[in-house]
Image: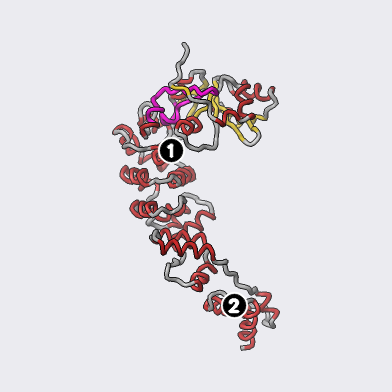
């Protein structure tokens, strides 16, 4: 039986890329799937292009190799290979159906049925596929949902969630970007019912999803729903206040997941960072966003230089947003912070030793004293002036 596409669109520009066009010539049965289809229809930017194919992965690999294309067997057990093209890597996955799931992993079997493959996907807006000539296949109403701003699971929400509990957080990630209407009662019940199982997720994956949720242009509605259903408290037990996040977003602060996490979090940021295994850079920035000194509009340039001597200017700027800086005075302050040169204390220990101070604790004492003098003067004393002050202290 021949399938009828849900609609036809003009072939997107990315399909005219020579390498991708060549790939689809080698694999004419393949279709574009996932985010590239969803965001093409939503007229949004996207980065990755993924394909699905009714052919077994070994056949896909052989065709690509015969065509002189580099191919890597990145996940043969699940039917995925990666074509390495100039400027782009494309994952190609054989159509699948789930045989067994345990809430985290799935055992799959290959199929050549496009609807069967679409039925195992998470949300209707992610279950569409598109041919190279712009024919869009939509088995579960994803196109209408996309247009309405409605996020729905494919099939029964409770079953979809039980197959992989990470889908709870993925729901809020996509809801933050595509949701415009309240989810239906079955979806809300499935999300709420999965809360006790969220503890089984790896903390790395939890932080990955949280970061993506907070990176949406406006995540407040989604995070508010997470809070209402008990999901937020389950994944951030340290404590949260969504109203603080809402005020930060309303101020027009730049989109930044860590700044938003700093606003949302009410509990111990170090405990949060350790529990979710944030990178050292992420941990240090989160702590600084919560504890660094605050620049204020009434501060003169000398005061700002003193702050900049010990705190990165990016952190100081972000702190102004967290403090409530949304008016012209705070905007002017941010401009001043960005325009001032970062002050650098011009002495090192060897400079003090060169003045005749023997190596040892006294060198550190002199350096600290000179630096305090330099800070008190607005960080403007030259290297020569600092040496003279060090010489005076050394003699004393």
Query: Of helix, strand and loop, which one carries label 1?
Result: helix
Residue 101 shows up from this direction: no
* Of 239 and 63, the residue lying toward us: 63
Query: Of helix, strand and loop, which one carries label 2?
Result: loop
State the CA–CA distance, disc 2 to disc 1: 56 Å
* Residue underneath mark 1: 166
* Residue underneath mark 2: 381
Q: Is residue 152 above or below residue 297?
A: above
Q: Position of residue 241 (x, y in %)?
A: 34, 53
Q: Which mark is residue 313?
A: none
Residue ID at (53%, 75%): 378
Residue 229 shows up from this direction: yes
In the image, 53: left or right of 5? right
Q: Which region of the structure is painted magenta?
A: 120-145
Query: Would you identify the image quadrant in which residue 167 lies?
Result: top left
Query: Would you identify the image quadrant in which residue 280 lies?
Result: bottom right
> In this figure, what is the number of numbered marks?
2
């Amino acid at each position: 039986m021949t399938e009828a596409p849900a609609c036809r669109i003009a072939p997107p520009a990315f399909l005219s890329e020579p390498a991708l066009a060549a790939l689809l010539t080698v694999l004419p049965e393949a279709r574009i799937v996932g985010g590239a289809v969803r965001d093409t229809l939503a007229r949004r930017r996207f980065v990755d292009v993924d394909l699905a194919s009714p052919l077994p992965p070994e056949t896909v690999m052989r065709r690509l190799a015969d065509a002189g294309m580099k191919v890597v067997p990145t996940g043969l057990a699940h039917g995925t290979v990666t074509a390495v093209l100039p400027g782009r890597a494309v994952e190609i996955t054989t159509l699948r159906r789930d045989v067994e799931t345990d809430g985290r992993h799935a055992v799959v079997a290959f199929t050549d049925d496009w609807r069967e493959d679409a039925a195992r996907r998470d949300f209707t807006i992610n279950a569409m596929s598109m041919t190279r000539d712009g024919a869009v296949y939509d088995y579960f109403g994803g196109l209408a949902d996309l247009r309405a701003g409605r996020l729905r699971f494919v099939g029964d929400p409770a079953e979809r969630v039980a197959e992989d509990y990470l889908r709870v957080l993925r729901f809020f990630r996509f809801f933050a970007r595509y949701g415009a209407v309240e989810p239906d009662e079955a979806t809300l019940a499935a999300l709420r019912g999965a809360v006790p199982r969220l503890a089984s997720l790896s903390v790395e994956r939890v932080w990955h999803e949280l970061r993506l949720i907070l990176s949406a242009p406006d995540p407040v509605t989604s995070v508010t729903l997470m809070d209402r259903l008990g999901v937020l408290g389950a994944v951030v037990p340290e404590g949260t206040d969504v109203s603080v996040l809402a005020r930060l977003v309303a101020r027009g602060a730049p989109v930044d997941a860590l700044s938003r996490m700093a606003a949302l979090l009410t509990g111990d940021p170090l405990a949060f960072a350790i529990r979710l295994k944030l990178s050292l850079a992420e941990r240090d920035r989160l702590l600084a966003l919560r504890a660094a000194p605050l620049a204020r509009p009434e501060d003169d340039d000398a005061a700002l230089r003193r702050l900049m001597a010990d705190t990165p200017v990016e952190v100081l700027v972000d702190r102004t947003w967290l403090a409530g800086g949304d008016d012209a005075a705070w905007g002017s302050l941010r401009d001043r912070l960005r325009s001032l040169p970062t002050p650098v204390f011009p002495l090192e220990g060897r400079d003090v030793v060169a003045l005749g101070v023997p190596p040892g604790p006294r060198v550190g004492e002199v350096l600290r004293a000179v630096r305090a003098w330099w800070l008190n003067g607005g960080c403007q004393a030259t290297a020569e002036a600092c040496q003279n002050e060090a010489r005076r202290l050394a003699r004393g």
